[in-house]
């Protein structure tokens, strides 16, 4: 049986028993980086490291299935920044993660291969379930969150992100989403929202659940109604969902972006307060590489001018470029919640402004199953919407990663894997019609 025949069966809505009866081929197409090429960009600046050279679509074996694991056929996936990091081998080569995983035993050893299949988001169909899987069966339509965790030890049982075995699927594990068959743990699966296309549903998981945990869930900033939330990169992957969660939860977003087009889009979406950081020319670092407090003050004054107060929460991820300003402008007792350092991970901030003003810095990373599930539920009920700016076929994965690497995109960039074309996969057309305006509305962000 070929992968094409399996995709045809899925497109024809074959039932679970039929899918379970289909023999899987030995190999599949998958987007990979190759271990033999880890040094290919040595000596180049980050900007000049080109994912179009390092990401390949190769024919590779379908992985063997272990206990509590599931093989899915991703119909669509998306580019996350972690795929950019993997493809430029920064800040470290992800082959190191796979080698470390292999030292844990036989199941981990399967991941240590001369290639790394990337991708941490998917919408697709269950093909096979391993021993011990009881909640899912072949034919189920699923979205996948990327928290890959065993929960064998005690640490993760309050919050699985704290488990010592916690990894990000398709980044710290092999067999990620950008492949015709992908291997996940059963506890990564969630029901696919029935009113979305494959590519819409496949674009959500990673950034949406990360934003949910940072702002809404019980573990981090715990935004409440009326909170003023400063959102960096508000039309990007994380920021687009953060903006939606603030609006949906009765907060007041102050969005920062870098072009008049993005400002106009956010206004159209009902965001009142938007700052164009480029037009307003904020330069938080002097030419000598020192923080510029006058610029911090100018930025803080602008926020006060817009909303009459300092932010209760700052949604941080640009990192070095903005972190000092984020700490400075947060209100007394306010919270800076951070999950990334896109512009550099050695941050500088003046600690006097933190301790004297009783501010909090919270480190956050992806989300636990419950947080991902709750975020997925909000989508399924039409309260939060996908933000998909472009969709590429699998063979253009390098170009798609290049777009994200150079901030040429808005929202998410999707990848069709098993789906033959865009627009497929919707099950509940009435529900889609009921939310069409909102879905189209957020698509204008793209
Ligand atoms: P993205 O779609 O590229 O969005 C990032 C946004 O940041 C851009 O749209 C840009 O918006 C803004 N930005 C870039 N440089 C900036 C600067 N110098 N100053 C201010 N804003 C700047 O990326 P993403 O998917 O949202 O991911 C963002 C970061 O979070 C990445 O580093 C990613 O690896 C990380 N991440 C971490 C987790 C986690 O679990 N820890 C999860 C998801 C993502 P404007 O140009 O419009 O201002």
Image (tube, grey):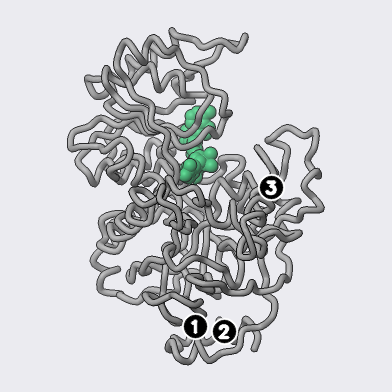
Asked which secondary structure carries label 2, the reply is helix
Task: Give how far apart the Cα atoms at labels 3 and 2 are.
Answer: 34 Å
Residue pictured at 25% horizontal, 37% vertical:
223
User: Would residue 125 be visible to someone looking at this image?
Assistant: yes
Q: Position of residue 242 (x, y in %)?
A: 35, 42
Q: Is residue 400 above or below residue 311?
A: below
Asked which secondary structure carries label 1, the reply is helix
Is 369 or 234 nearer to us in this picture? 369
The image quarter containing residue 239 is top left
Q: Is residue 48 left or right of residue 337?
A: right
Asked which secondary structure carries label 3, the reply is helix
Residue pictured at 56% horizontal, 29% vertical:
345
Of badges 3 and 2, nearer the viewer stands 3
Q: Which disc, if any, is residue 300?
A: none
Q: Is residue 413 left or right of residue 355?
A: right
* Residue labelled with disc 2: 6
Is 149 or 117 nearer to us in this picture? 149
Q: Which disc, if any, is residue 10?
A: 1
Dot 2: few (<14), some (14–19), or many (≥20) neighbours within 10 Å? many
Of badges 1 and 3, nearer the viewer stands 3
Tags 1 and 2 touching, CB below 8 Å: yes
Q: Is residue 329 above or below residue 34?
A: above
Tags 3 and 2 touching, CB below 8 Å: no
Q: Which disc, if any, is residue 96?
A: 3
Q: Earlier in the sequence, mark 1 or mark 3?
A: 1
Is 399 or 113 nearer to us in this picture? 113
Q: Position of residue 233 (x, y in %)?
A: 44, 36
């Amino acid at each position: 049986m070929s992968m094409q025949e399996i995709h045809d069966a899925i497109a024809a809505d074959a039932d679970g028993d039929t899918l379970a009866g289909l023999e899987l081929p030995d190999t599949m197409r998958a987007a990979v980086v190759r271990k033999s090429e880890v040094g290919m960009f040595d000596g180049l600046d980050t900007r000049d490291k080109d994912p179009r050279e390092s990401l390949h679509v190769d024919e590779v074996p379908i992985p063997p299935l272990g206990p509590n694991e599931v093989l899915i056929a991703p119909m669509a996936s998306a580019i996350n920044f972690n795929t950019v990091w993997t493809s430029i081998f920064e800040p470290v080569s992800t082959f190191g993660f796979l080698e470390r995983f292999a030292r844990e035993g036989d199941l981990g050893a399967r991941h240590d291969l001369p290639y790394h299949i990337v991708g941490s988001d998917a919408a697709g169909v269950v093909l096979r379930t391993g021993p011990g899987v009881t909640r899912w069966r072949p034919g189920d339509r699923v979205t996948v969150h990327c928290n890959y965790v065993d929960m064998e030890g005690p640490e993760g049982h309050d919050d699985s992100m704290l488990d010592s075995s916690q990894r990000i699927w398709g980044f710290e594990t092999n067999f990620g989403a950008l492949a015709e068959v992908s291997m996940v743990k059963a506890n990564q699966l969630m029901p696919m929202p029935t009113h979305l296309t494959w590519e819409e549903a496949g674009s959500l998981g990673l950034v949406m659940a990360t934003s949910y945990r940072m702002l809404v869930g019980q573990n981090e900033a715990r935004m409440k109604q009326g909170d003023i939330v400063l959102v960096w990169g508000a039309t990007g992957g994380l920021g687009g969902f953060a903006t939606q969660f603030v609006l949906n939860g009765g907060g007041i977003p102050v969005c920062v972006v870098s072009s008049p087009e993005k400002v106009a889009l956010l206004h159209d979406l009902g965001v009142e307060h938007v700052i164009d950081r480029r037009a307003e020319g904020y330069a938080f670092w002097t030419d000598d590489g020192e923080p510029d407090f006058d610029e911090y003050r100018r930025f803080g004054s602008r926020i006060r001018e817009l909303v009459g107060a300092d932010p209760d929460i700052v949604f941080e991820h640009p990192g070095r470029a903005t972190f000092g300003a984020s700490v400075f402008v947060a209100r007394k007792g306010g919270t800076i919640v951070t999950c990334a350092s896109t512009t550099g991970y050695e941050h500088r901030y003046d600690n006097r402004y933190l301790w004297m003003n009783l501010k909090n810095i919270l480190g956050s990373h992806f989300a636990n199953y419950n947080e991902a599930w709750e975020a997925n539920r909000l989508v399924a009920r039409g309260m939060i919407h996908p933000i998909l700016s472009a969709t590429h076929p699998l063979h253009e994965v390098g170009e798609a990663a290049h777009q994200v690497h150079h901030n040429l995109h808005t929202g998410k960039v999707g990848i069709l894997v098993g789906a033959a074309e865009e627009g497929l996969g919707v099950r509940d057309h009435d529900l889609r019609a009921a939310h069409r305006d909102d879905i189209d509305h957020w698509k204008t962000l793209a």
